[in-house]
Amino acid sequence: MRETSALIQYVVLHPWKVALSIAIGVLLGVTAFYVLQVQAAIDTVASEDFDPQRAREAMVVDDAPPSNWVFVEPSDLAVDEETADPQSDLARVFDLDEGLDPYDFNPHVFGEPVGDGLFTSYLLVGADASGFLADVIILALEPADGTDPIMVSLPRDLYVWNVCEGSFTRLNAGLGGCDNVASGTEMLAILVEDYTGIPVDHSARVDFSGFSRIVDAMGGTTICVDHPTRDAKAKLEISRAGCRHANGATTLAWVRSRHTEQLRGGVWVEVVGSDFARQSRQQDVLFQLAEKAAGFSTPAGLTNRLSAVVSSVRLDSSWTFGQAVSTAWRYRGLSKDSVLGFSIDAENYRTPGGAAVLLPSNSFADQLGEVYEIDEAPTSRS
C-alpha cells in the first residue's frame, strides 16, 4: 500500500515526467515492433547462386559445327514448312562444306569486352508465367566515374549466341538455365555479357504476380493513352483516352503488351513498333516507382513496401537485401531526364522454321558510345 501511495503521489507531483516516460516507452515499443517486422521481412528474401564466370567455365561446348542455329531473311530462303528444305536453301547462300562461322554470320551478336571496373551493372529481369523465359530484360549501368546512370531494355526476341546450346537462341531463353551447370539467371547473364561485352555484377528477378504486388504496395501508377487501348493476350483493356490511375494488374498488362491495339476512327488497329513501345513503358513504370520510393516517411510505410518487395523479388547470392535497398535508396526519385539510354538497333528476321526473331544490326559498343564515352577503364570494380 505504501509503494502504491508513493507512486500515486509521484504521478500527482510530476505529471510531465510520467507522461514523457510513458511516451518514450511507447515509442521504443512501437519502433522495436517495426524493426522486428522489417527484419522478419528481410529474412524471407529469396536468393539464388550467381557466379556466371564459374558457370561459363563449367560448360562443355561441342567443337563440331552447329547444324541448327542459322537463320536468314525470308526473302532469301523459303519458310513454308511444307516446301522448305533448309539445307538446300542454306547452300544457296553459304558454303556448307566450310562450316558456318557465327561471327561471320552476324558480328553484332558478339560484344566487344568492356574494361572491368568501368561500370557496376545490374540485370533486372521479369519472368513470364512459366519462370523459364524472361519477359522483361533491362540492363542498368552505374558508371564508376559518378556520371549519370545508363539504362537499356534488351529485346526478349534478340537472337544471340548461346554458348550452352552451341547455337543462336532468343535472349529470353537464357532464363531456362544450362543442364544443371548454370542457373537461369546465370545463363541469362552470360548471354547478356556475350552480347554487350559487359559483365553482369548483380541481378534481381521478379515474377508477374510479384510485380503486381510491388506496384500496388507503391500506390499504383499513371497510364496515359491517346486512344482506347487493348491487348487481349496481355489482358489489357483501357476504354477511354487520357490518363488514369492504374493498379498492379493493369500496370502489369500495360508493360507486358506486345500486340497493342488502339481504336482509331472506329477501327481497332495494331500499334506499329509495339515491342519498342513496350520497352519504353517498362522504363517509364520503373521511373514512376523510383519517384514513389522517395515518399518513404514512416516505419509502417517502409515495412509495408519491404514486405511486398521481399516476397516478390529473387536476388543474386552476391547481393544482400541491405545492399539492394541501399542502391534503390540512392536512386530514389530518379527521373527519366537524369538517365542515359538508347534503343537496340535490330531487324526482323525469321528462322528457316518460321520463328520471328530480332537480329542485331549494330554493335552494342557503338550504340553505348553514342551516350557514354568509353575511355580507359578504372583498375578495379566498384
Image (cartoon, grey):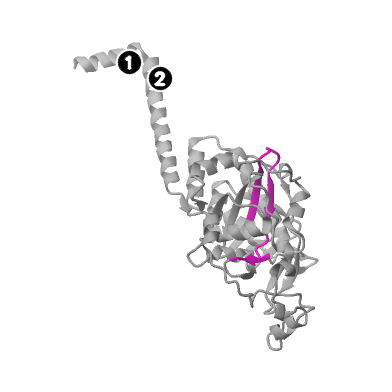
- Quadrant position of residue 5: top left
What residue span does the magenta drawing correspond to?
Answer: 138-163
Counting from the top left corner in percent of width and height, residue 83 is at: 71, 88
Residue 247 in sight here? no
Provide the residue designation for mark 2.
Answer: 20
| Front-most of residues 17 and 368 | 368
| Alpha carbons under labels 2 and 1: distance apart | 12 Å
The residue shown at (61%, 66%) is: 162
Q: Earlier in the sequence, mark 2 or mark 1?
A: 1
Label 1 sits on what residue type? Answer: Val
Provide the residue designation for mark 1.
Answer: 11
Q: Is residue 114 above or below residue 34?
A: below
Counting from the top left corner in percent of width and height, residue 100 is at: 70, 74
The residue shown at (77%, 65%) is: 272
Task: Say what secondary structure mark 2 lies in.
Answer: helix
Q: Does 15 sit left or right of 187 as displayed?
A: left
Residue 175 on the magenta span? no
Residue 155 on the magenta span? yes
Counting from the top left corner in percent of width and height, residue 361 is at: 77, 63
Q: Is residue 274 above or below residue 5?
A: below
Residue at far top of view: 13
Task: Say what secondary structure mark 1 lies in.
Answer: helix
